[in-house]
């Protein structure tokens, strides 16, 4: 499985997080189903946006990309995303890209224009448009493709860019320059997984032109079908608009994690089917938090040890059927809640199943008390304890109005107080 990863010039937003979490889920389910999975997720570490941002900051490109790769890894780890088996960087595979371009030239599918760029000749590849379902007359150059008067056709896209002053560059048979964006993934995918592999994934915005161009490059060079299955996750939306940096309506993962537990964010991303639009709002995240807390509360009610899934049990069978039907996480999570209902009725076996199935999705891996007691982001346990002590003192002097004000103050912060005799404990809402 090959998944198009991040272009590392800024922090990851929630749309990037959805890609990482969705394909982490896919990999986990394939492994749970008995497949051996070789997972590649690339890093684009050379790009017009990267070069521009580095110039704006007055720093080397490598320093910029290293920093944001580190931030990306931190965000992914927080969300429970396992590292891919291979995480190639574009700058490490320039020779492979040059080799692919030479093969395309040999097959008369690429040409060097008067400007010095090497372009792919779209109309010479008979299958162009088969992924997006568009005809050549409907197609337009993608947002990252420079329109160049030297092209034979406006739809042709660049494979190798001529060098510009003060930009990173490599020597090549076509002069100094750097690879175009689309050729990166074809070269890295073929190098690490072979000229034909099973699954290629990424965000819906990559279907055209990026993935369409990957097919043309790869199949044009090899003469073989490139990928068996294409998977595209839908956008995260804010007020019915795609979340993106270009629109300025994006929410940075690390900012969201200041207010919400990382497992809540992962749960929120998995509650919707990966091919359905996902609407971001505080209300929807709060709902996800309540839903996940209910599952942890069930596990707290019936403590259990880590065990494997009993796949012959009816809830597990329905969970498996849902996941085998195009990775149907909403229906799978519904089975977790059905199991929680049984746990609340005293069924210890259901608790073991709930815990085991949750872990298949990268959820419910903590001690219930750790999740339920953990203070919301931005609220320290020391502050909570101080407020509880003040409330206890108010109750002792029979100032119940003050005690109620403190209870409501904590509730507004997502903290529920539970009085048992003279002792008071707390948990998250």
Image: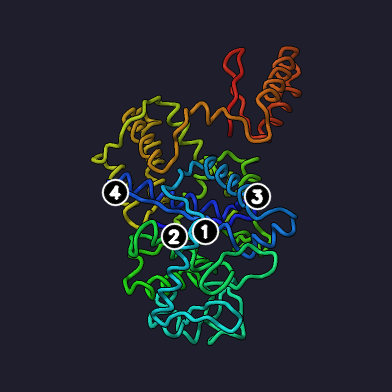
State the residue position of label 1.
Answer: 90
Q: In this view, does 184 lie to the left or right of 310?
A: right
Residue identified by numbered label 4: 35
Total numbered circles: 4
Residues under numbered marks 3 and 4 in contact, where contact means CB atoms less than 8 Å apart? no
Cα separation, mark 3 vs mark 2, equals 23 Å
- What distance separates the C-alpha of mark 4 from that of mark 1? 28 Å
Name the image quarter holding residue 170.
bottom right
Q: Distance between the residues labelled 3 and 4?
A: 38 Å
Q: Do the residues labelled 1 and 3 touch (CB within 8 Å)?
A: no
**Residue 188's disc number:** 2
Q: Which residue shows up at 34% across the image and 27% down it?
A: 348
Locate residue 102 relative to residue 253 in the image: left or right: left
- Residue 335 lies left or right of residue 74; in this view the side is left
Residue carrying label 3: 63
For label 4, the SS is: loop
User: Dot 4: within a 10 Å radius of its alpha carbon, few (fewer than 14), some, or many (20 or more) residues?
Assistant: few
Per the image, label 3 sits on a secondary structure element best described as helix
Quarter of the picture holding the C terminus: top right
Cα separation between marks 1 and 3: 15 Å
Could you say where residue 352 lies in the image, as x and y percent from the top left? 34, 31
Q: Position of residue 193 (x, y in %)?
A: 36, 57
Q: Do the residues labelled 2 and 1 touch (CB within 8 Å)?
A: yes
Residue 349 in the image, given as x and y percentages of width and height: 31, 30
Tell me the SS state at disc 2.
helix
Q: Earlier in the sequence, mark 4 or mark 1?
A: 4
Q: Which of marks 3 and 2 is nearer the N terminus?
A: 3
Q: Going from the N terminus, do you reach mark 1 or mark 3 first?
A: 3
């Amino acid at each position: 499985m090959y998944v198009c990863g991040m272009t590392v010039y800024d922090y990851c937003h929630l749309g990037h997080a959805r890609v990482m979490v969705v394909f982490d889920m896919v990999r986990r389910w394939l492994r749970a189903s008995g497949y051996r999975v070789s997972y590649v997720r690339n890093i684009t570490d050379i790009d017009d946006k990267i070069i521009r941002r580095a110039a704006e900051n007055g720093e080397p490109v490598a320093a910029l990309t290293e920093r944001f790769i580190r931030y990306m890894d931190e965000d992914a780890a927080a969300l429970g995303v396992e590292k891919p088996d291979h995480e190639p960087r574009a700058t490490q595979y320039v020779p492979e890209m040059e080799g692919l371009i030479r093969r395309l030239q040999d097959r008369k599918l690429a040409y060097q224009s008067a400007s010095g760029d090497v372009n792919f000749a779209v109309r010479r590849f008979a299958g162009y448009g088969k992924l997006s379902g568009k005809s050549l007359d409907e197609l337009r150059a993608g947002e990252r493709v420079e329109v160049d008067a030297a092209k034979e056709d406006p739809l042709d896209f660049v494979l190798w860019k001529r060098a510009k002053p003060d930009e990173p560059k490599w020597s090549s048979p076509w002069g100094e320059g750097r690879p175009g964006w689309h050729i990166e993934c074809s070269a890295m995918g073929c190098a690490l997984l072979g000229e034909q592999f099973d699954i290629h994934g990424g965000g819906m915005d990559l279907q055209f032109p990026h993935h369409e161009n990957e097919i043309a490059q790869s199949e044009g060079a090899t003469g073989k079908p490139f990928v068996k299955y294409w998977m595209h996750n839908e956008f995260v939306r804010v007020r019915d608009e795609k979340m993106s940096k270009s629109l300025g309506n994006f929410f940075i993962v690390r900012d969201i994690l200041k207010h919400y537990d990382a497992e809540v964010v992962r749960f929120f991303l998995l509650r919707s089917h990966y091919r359905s639009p996902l609407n971001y709002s505080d209300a929807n995240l709060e709902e996800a938090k309540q839903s996940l807390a209910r599952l942890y509360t069930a596990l707290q009610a019936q403590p259990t040890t880590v065990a494997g899934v009993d796949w012959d049990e009816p809830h597990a069978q329905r969970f498996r059927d849902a996941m085998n039907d195009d990775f149907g996480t909403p229906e799978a999570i519904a089975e977790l809640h059905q199991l929680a209902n049984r746990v609340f009725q005293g069924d210890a076996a259901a608790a073991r199943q709930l815990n085991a199935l949750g872990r298949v999705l990268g959820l419910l891996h903590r001690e219930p008390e750790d999740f339920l007691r953990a203070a919301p982001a931005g609220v320290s346990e020391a502050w909570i304890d101080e407020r509880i002590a003040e409330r206890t003192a108010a109750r002792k002097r029979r100032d119940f109005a003050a005690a109620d004000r403190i209870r409501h103050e904590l509730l507004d912060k997502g903290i529920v107080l539970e009085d048992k005799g003279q002792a008071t404990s707390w948990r998250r809402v």
